[in-house]
Image (cartoon, rainbow, N blue to C red):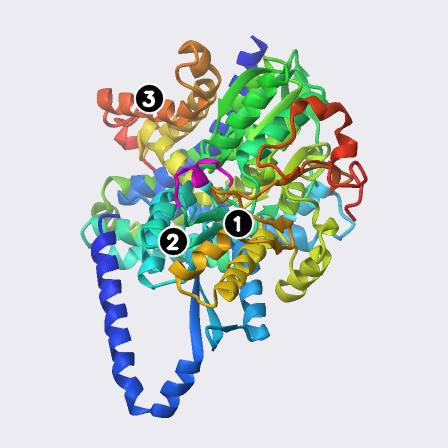
Amino acid sequence: MKFSRPLLFTLATITVAMLAACGQEAPKTPAASTAAAQELVVKIGHAAPLTGSQAHIGKDNENGTKLAIEEANAAGIVIGGKKAKFVLLSEDDQADPKTGNIVAQKLVDAKINGMIGHLNSGTTIPASKIYFDAGIPQISPSATNPKYTQQGYKSAFRTMANDVQQGKLLGEFAVTRIKAKRIALIDDRTAYGQGIADEFEKAVVAGGGKIISRQFTTDKSTDFMAILTAIKGDKPEVIFFGGMDPQGAPMAKQIKSLGIKAKFLGGDGIYTPEFIKLAGADAEGAYASLPGVPLEKMPGGIAFRDKYKAKYNMEIQLYAPFCYDAVNVMIAAMKRADSAEPAKYLPEIAKTQHDGVTSKISFDEKGDLKGGAITFYQVKNGKWEVIETMGGAPAVAPAPVAAAPDKEDKGHGDAGSAGYK
Amino acid sequence: MDIFLQQLINGIVLGSIYALVALGYTMVYGILGLINFAHGEVVMIGAMVALAVIHALAGVALPGPIIVLFGLLVAIPACMLLGYGIERVAYRPLRHAPRLAPLITAIGVSIVLQNLAMMIWGRQYIAFPSLLPTANFSLGEAHITGLQIFIVLLSTALMAALIFLVQKTRLGRAMRATAQNPEVASLMGVNTHQIVSLTFIIGSALAAVAGLMVSAYYGLAHYYMGFMLGLKAFSAAVLGGIGNLGGAMLGGLLLGIIESMGAGYIGPLTGGFLGSHYQDVFAFFVLILVLVFRPTGLLGERVAERA
């Protein structure tokens, strides 16, 4: 990392030199220069872990982003009287905060018009300062740690409910739906895992449940026998895990092999087809939540899933629809402002009213998604099936706990139906 | 007490996997004085090849364990070939170069293998299909699965076989001679190049077995899985005294048990001040302590037994 500054400086120098070279060439061919003048190049930055243990989820984000950008190019959008050509600059942040800052600086130096990302809260939060300082609008599709939008950066938005919303409803779900009193917590010590576990803990305690044990792991571990054994001694009814599927799946297996009877519950990080594939029969009965209503219930949700599958020949992993929405929110703001200048279209993002694939997207004054609903799923017969949708009230704060017992009626419609087919 | 027993079981299973991988590091170090950082990646390739075969055979009407055995039978030669190739391409040309050079190529090979695996098998986690019987025995409140017992038994058997090979056979004597002094050994008619190649081949075969074990135990394989495992196994080899076969086994077992006990008891012992995320800190703290008082590792001084 010591080399980052000189390296970036070199990169910047090369970029400047190349730009200068382009500038010199342009006047020689007037025809080309007018063609270029009619075309507006809009650079969209993207960053996610494209290598390492979360690479499959990072690639999924990139795919979702790319799909939206290709569609926008095909649609022939005109901004400021010129035909807009959207270019994706995708970087690998390795889910590492240090690398995240390096690629953020690199993207800023490449003069991106807007930023989609990062994937993890741990990379998004430090990088958000770099985008803010450069005045570049940033929409994270999946960073759910509350801190991201609490720093007072006007450039930061997200298209997913944050962990205050999600963790709170998860806690209520554990106490009121699973009816658990003794709950054990594990988190992976990342900004996401720790954040959602903290909010979960608060909601459990508020709901009258008891946190009997709190254990920790990392986002690179596969062996949880020791911490699960420690938890086992405390006889929990529910084990909550704040983390991602590469840890969640082996954890579910090891829970079963240790003969622990507790229910396994996780956040959006384990709501993936991968989780079921990896944990096999031991995934059965596990619960997870995902911000938003089920894809099948969204206008255009199934169309998006089919489009994605046709293009990439694989299932959506996790956040691709949220990335797709993030790009479209950004482009719609550019259209309304009739400019791709960050300073000009940034205020338009804040005014967003967008019918997205995931939900109707609008932001509160901090840049958080308004009224994010949370849907709960359970693995039944090797598939994630919808249990119910909670929250989704227009306020940022989710619906109060008092109404919990009759929440089936309050949810985003069709609560409790097993419509995931 | 049940909890303690369970933690002990956890530690022994984890430790036998570490030990098996650690043998690969320690054998190469014993002979060449080289840390083969690509060894973790050989484990990963072993798991990947085995899983590819297992998935290809998944539809065939054979009992699960037989399919897994086929996977292993393909993975072992594949890894042997890989180990031989790594030695020929990355290390042999640098035999007389400064010690830093092969260390750097080792890291290079490790990165190349990771990326190669990513290109071949993709970024997805590869699931280990449920082919093995899921027997689960309980000892009071503690549980042990058939797979765990099998892992410990197979590791022990392989380690015993390796010790026999090194201590009792002609080949083993040639290996020990090469470890002590390659020049003199070659003057005595030992083909040292061949011995070095064989060391890599044997280590890689063990790595293939370890790879399959790890993926069966955790239910998954991934192109990145070799990195952390390699690091832990390397630490285990250093803990036991690198270059010493018995040391690698002792170090592996100890590291596994220390990790399990650390994760299980560090919270209660410190009154909740330190949590289980300190399990690695705890394990490496023990490693540092051992190295301060015994810089050669626990069994490191018995140089003559190097393989």
Q: For the residues carrying marks 3 and 1, which lies nearer the camera in this image?
A: 1
Q: Is residue B202 visible?
A: no
Residue A66, compared with residue A21, is above or below; it is: above
Q: Are marks 1 and 2 in contact (CB under 8 Å)?
A: no
Percent of width and height locating residue A101:
34, 48
Question: Same subunit under labels 1 and 2?
Answer: no
Find residue A37 and report its horizontal and vertical position in percent.
40, 81
Count residues near mark 3 (Cα–Cα under 10 Å), then give few for <14, some for 14-19, many for 20+. some
Please report the bounds of the magenta region as a residue range.
A144-153
Q: Amino acid at mark 1?
A: Pro
Q: Main secondary structure of the magenta part?
A: loop
Q: Which residue is mark 1?
A: A141
The residue carrying mark 3 is: B286
Q: Chain of mark 1?
A: A
Question: Residue B111's mark?
Answer: 2
Q: Is residue A189 above or below residue A294?
A: above
Return the chain for callout 3: B
Residue B2 position by quadrant: top right
Report the amino acid beneath label 3.
Val
Q: How far across and down, in percent of the image, does residue A155 sit?
A: 41, 50
